Image (cartoon, grey):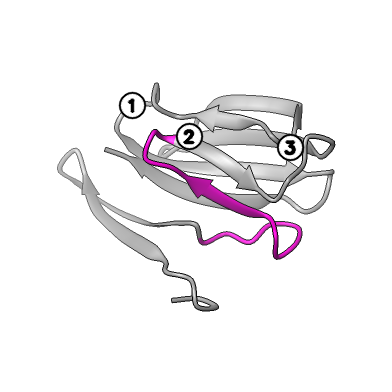
Amino acid sequence: MVNSEPITELTLVSFNNQLVGIKTSKMMDRSVTENQIVSIDIRHQIHWLGASATDHLNAQVFDFKGRLIYSSRQLPGSFVLNTSRFSHGAYVLRYQINNETWKHFSFVMN
């Protein structure tokens, strides 16, 4: 629990029978304000909760090897990223709202 909110956390210790050290969580990253939260839903869609359509979003997704697999700039803040087409594995989402500090959100597709 963080600020009375449940946090789901996963530590990935192996991937394709090779040891790795990736720690990921859902709904854990706080964005520009307390009202802006990144979450991933059961349909594998990433939402920027609290961001408005007038906010500008820059987003990048990297796989567990650090390869850039998705990048887009100046999206509306109401944009929803569909990750269902991503292969199984661990990913890091790097995002920025209104050119503020870059934030990170990690997730696992299984």
For mark 2, what is the residue? 45
Out of 73 and 54, give the one closest to the viewer: 54
Q: Amino acid at mark 1?
A: Ser
Q: Secondary structure at mark 1?
A: loop
Around disc 1, counting alpha carbons within 10 Å, would you say few (fewer than 14), some (14 to 19), or many (20 or more)? Answer: few
Q: Is residue 29 magenta?
A: yes
Pinpoint residue 15: horizontal percent, then vertical percent: 23, 43
Compared with 84, 6 (above or below) is below
Which quadrant, please, contains the C terminus? top left
Q: Amino acid at mark 3?
A: Gly
In this picture, which residue range is highlighted in magenta?
Answer: 28-44
Pinpoint residue 60: horizontal percent, then vertical percent: 61, 34
**First-in-chain label (1 vs 2):** 2
Q: Is residue 104 magenta?
A: no
Q: Residue at x 42, y 69 (%)?
A: 6
**First-in-chain label (1 vs 3):** 3
Pinpoint residue 92: horizontal percent, then vertical percent: 50, 44
Please report contact status of discs 1 and 3: CB closer than 8 Å, yes or no: no
Out of 26 and 104, give the one closest to the viewer: 26
Q: Could you tell whether 85 is left or right of 75 in the image? A: left
The quadrant holding residue 29 is bottom right
Pinpoint residue 55: horizontal percent, then vertical percent: 82, 40
Out of 89 and 26, give the one closest to the viewer: 26
Q: Residue at x 37, y 62 (%)?
A: 8
For mark 3, what is the residue? 77
For mark 1, what is the residue? 87
Q: Amino acid at mark 2?
A: Gln
